[in-house]
Image (tube, grey):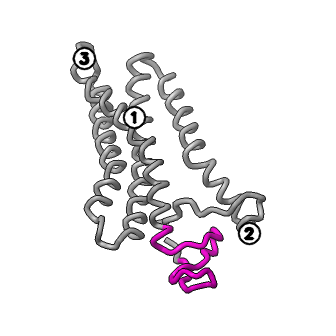
Amino acid sequence: MGQIPMGNGGNGRDGAGTNPRSGRRETEEERADRQWGELLQELRVAQTGVQILFGFLLAVVFQPRFADLSTVDRNIYVVTVMLGSATAAALIGPVSYHRLLTGRRMKPQTVTWASRLTKLGLGLLFCTMCSTLLLIMRVALHNVVALWLVGAMALWFLVCWFVFPLWAIARNNGLRPGEDGGAPDDESDPRP
């Protein structure tokens, strides 16, 4: 996480400075509070989807048709359930991390580690979604078209979740804060 230069800076608050990346005048604690709130909003969306998907995966094994799955499909199922478990753990982990560290004056570090865990969770979610789609398409189609469909959807996930944001970062790197006509913002910047 980038450090905000500390000092009065003429704003009347001790310890407040202007973050050169965002142009915001906030203390490290204020920034951590804001970033934590933003991260919680992001996690709410991801956690809901993961919990629904994981519930679906857990129910599959109890369906009568499960016994008819091939060994390959059963193995895909087991991998998918394990990926779903890891995804749920990673995306719920920041809440536990925050709860256990609350009151210990470690909010900036908590935000940094929670952000890292969330990024890991998103990567695991990508794998879980692809694995789930592979299982469903194999059962539904019984042919190689399933692989092509899953490959196309995996590419779409990559573009939506990673390529577009990385493209925006690369595009914005040449601009000074606020130069693009919008308000500068560092979002939840904690980078690993």
Magenta segment's dominant SS is: loop
**Residue 142 located left or right of residue 93:** right
Can residue 30 be found in the magenta stretch? yes
Q: Position of residue 148 (x, y in %)?
A: 53, 28
| Side of 15 where 11 appears, left or right | right
* Circles 2 and 1: CB atoms closer than 8 Å: no
Cα separation between marks 2 and 1: 41 Å
Stretch in magenta? 4-31
Residue 168 image point, x, y percent: 67, 54
Return the disc, 1 or 3, that comes first in the chain's sequence. Answer: 3
Where in the figure is residue 133, as x and y percent of width and height?
43, 29
Residue type, numbered disc 1? Ser
Let me know if residue 20 is in the magenta part. yes
- Residue tagged 2: 176
The relative height of residue 160 versus residue 66 in the rendered view (above or below) is: below
Can you identify the residue that label 1 sits on?
Answer: 131
Q: Nearer the viewer, mark 2 or mark 1?
A: 2
Q: Amino acid at mark 3?
A: Gln
Q: Is residue 88 above or below residue 34?
A: above
Q: Residues within 10 Å of mark 3 (few under 14, many from 20)?
A: few
**Which amino acid does the dot numbered 2 rest on?**
Arg
Question: Could you tell me residue 165's position as x and y percent?
Answer: 61, 51
- For numbered disc 1, what is the local secondary structure? helix
Disc 3 to disc 2, C-alpha distance? 57 Å
Q: Which residue is mark 3?
A: 63
